[in-house]
């Protein structure tokens, strides 16, 4: 009897102790994390790493309390806060309205598009129903149903629910003219993006010919300073220009041998752009506008705002918030993240600005027990080079949200290694393929990841890696972190 009791105790101790494979996998991970700092190109680099288990216990770390640039992993914090504050089923509303009177099919007044910050309007990411063509046509049909066959006035875009300062204070000049540098606007259409078509030369240094750009951006002027780069050099072009201005400089290089190379820019006046697009669609549908288009911002400056009461025509609904969050993280759409940040501010304070959004995000996570010391937030997308968070803070956020009812929406929005989004090319044909769900971030000399690993035994651990100021190539750094992913996936 005594012998059997001793054997039972021994068996229990064995069951409750980590297996040799568990120990060795975690030991190998820790050794690799430690060795990263001594690898080629990392002499002057800073990097933080943090890994937590399902209970929030620390499993491994390296310099986890150092504030480091987040790049686009900032979107995890923004989208998680949006899901918590707004709810995964939240839908933006865009209102089609008119003032004046309708007599015999003629509107003696104006048609308005009044936005509430929906970044998804007219985006091709959400299916045919939400495409720009179909959205504009639907608005036109509803205007016709209201009995309007001619507009003796303007089509006016109204984005005044959000701040007129669409770009956060410290975004980089080289970013804001490009499609990924579009800031938050109260009225968005087609992700506030337009296309430029160019023909490159055959040899390095050859001039690049500007062919044409989207017809609906006919008011833009371009000074083209592009040249042809080396073979295989990729797109190294930048569009320079400020919001609400029409002059654009195109600088940098494009690869040789392209008859029609397309680059994308950010629309400088989103509400004016939406008004022009609807006006054009109405004309196409046989509903002319006699006085062209306008924007509420410019009308307010010029003192031309109508005092007449507006009447509703139609209310356009966005897809549910969880779908917007999905594309925000899958394709790292900065516009979506910035609009979410301003919407959080609007919901909590009644004022839709980047600054107010940041304050509310800080408050939200402090209430959740995340210390804000060392957390420097400047925007919602991570495009600012002044954002900084510690690996411990980011991993703590990831751990805390895993028990929230809306967590499945956040988790499913994260790219999957070797499968989807910005991680689709990583860890293919390795033990980590399909095991990492994480948001990536990338800037010059910055590569970051924040998310979850599913271990061999099916456990889900939270992790963050921030690598800043490495001297090696981006591809070399990516390869090192792919190896880290593999070691994470080999945990028991």
Image: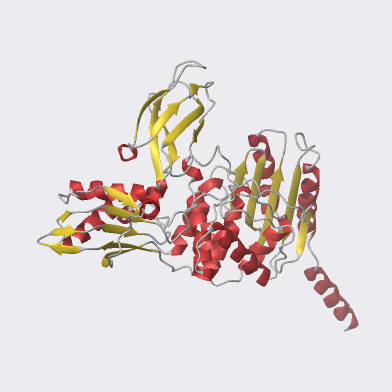
Q: Residue at x 55, y 67 (%)?
A: 407
Q: Which quarter of the rendering shows the C terminus?
A: bottom right
Numbered label tally: 0
Q: Quadrant of residue 1?
A: bottom right
Name the residue furthest left. Answer: 104
User: What is the x, y in percent for residue 475?
Assistant: 63, 35
Query: In this orientation, which residue lies closer to the viewer: 329 or 223?
Result: 223
Residue drawn at point x = 61 percent, y = 43 percent: 442
Percent across and percent down for residue 364 are: 62, 68
Q: Residue at x 65, y 44 (%)?
A: 447
- The percent coordinates of residue 360 (x first, y second) are 59, 66
User: Quick check: 442 left or right of 228?
Assistant: right
Is residue 489 shown left or right of residue 125? right
In percent of the image, x 44 and y 69: which residue is there?
89
**Image x and y of residue 485, in percent:** 66, 49
Closer to the camera in the image, 425 or 210: 210
Q: Residue placed farthest to the bottom in the image?
A: 1
Foreground of the two, 353 or 3: 353
Is 308 located above or below residue 486 in the figure? Answer: below
Q: Is residue 329 visible?
A: yes
**Is 58 situated above or below 68?**
below
């Amino acid at each position: 009897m005594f012998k059997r009791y001793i054997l039972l105790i021994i068996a229990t101790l064995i069951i409750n102790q980590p297996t040799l494979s568990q120990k060795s996998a975690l030991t190998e991970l820790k050794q690799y994390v430690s060795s990263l700092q001594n690898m080629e190109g990392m002499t002057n680099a800073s990097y933080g790493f943090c890994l937590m288990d399902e209970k929030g216990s620390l499993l491994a770390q390296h310099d986890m309390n150092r504030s480091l640039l987040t790049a686009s992993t900032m979107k995890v914090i923004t989208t998680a806060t949006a899901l918590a504050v707004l709810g995964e089923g939240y839908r933006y509303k865009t209102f089609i309205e008119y003032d004046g009177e309708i007599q015999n099919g003629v509107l003696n007044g104006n048609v308005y598009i009044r936005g509430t910050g929906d970044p998804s309007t007219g985006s091709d990411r959400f299916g045919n129903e939400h495409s720009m063509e179909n959205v504009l046509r639907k608005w036109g049909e509803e205007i016709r149903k209201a009995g309007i066959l001619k507009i003796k006035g303007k089509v006016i875009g109204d984005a005044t629910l959000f701040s007129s300062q669409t770009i956060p204070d410290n975004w980089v000049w080289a970013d804001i003219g490009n499609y990924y540098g579009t800031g938050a606007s109260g009225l968005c259409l087609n992700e506030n993006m337009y296309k430029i078509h160019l023909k490159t030369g055959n040899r390095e240094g050859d001039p690049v010919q500007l062919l044409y750009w989207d017809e609906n951006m006919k008011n833009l002027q371009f000074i083209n300073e592009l040249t042809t780069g080396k073979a295989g050099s990729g797109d190294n072009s930048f569009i320079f220009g400020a919001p609400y201005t029409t002059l654009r400089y195109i600088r940098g290089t494009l690869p040789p041998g392209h008859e029609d190379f397309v680059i994308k820019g950010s629309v400088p006046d989103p509400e004016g752009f939406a008004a022009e697009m609807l006006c054009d669609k109405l004309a196409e549908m046989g509903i002319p506008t006699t006085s062209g288009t306008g924007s509420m911002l410019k009308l307010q400056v010029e003192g031309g705002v109508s005092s007449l009461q507006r009447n509703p025509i139609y209310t356009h609904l966005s897809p549910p918030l969880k779908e917007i969050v999905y594309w925000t993280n899958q394709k790292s759409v900065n516009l979506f993240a910035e609009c979410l940040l301003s919407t959080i501010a609007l919901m909590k304070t009644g004022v839709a600005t980047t600054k107010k959004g940041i304050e509310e995000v800080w408050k939200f996570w402090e209430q959740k027990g995340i210390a804000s010391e060392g957390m420097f937030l400047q925007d919602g997308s991570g495009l600012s080079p002044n954002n900084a968070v510690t690996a411990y803070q980011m991993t703590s956020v990831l751990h805390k949200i895993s028990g929230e009812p809306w967590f499945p929406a956040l988790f499913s929005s994260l790219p999957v290694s070797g499968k989807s989004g910005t991680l689709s090319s990583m860890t293919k044909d390795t033990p980590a393929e399909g095991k990492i769900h994480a948001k990536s971030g990338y800037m010059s000399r910055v590569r970051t990841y924040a998310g979850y690993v599913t271990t061999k035994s099916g456990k889900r651990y939270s992790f963050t890696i921030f690598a800043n100021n490495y001297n090696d190539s981006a591809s070399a750094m990516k390869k090192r972190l792919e190896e880290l992913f593999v070691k994470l996936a080999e945990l028991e």
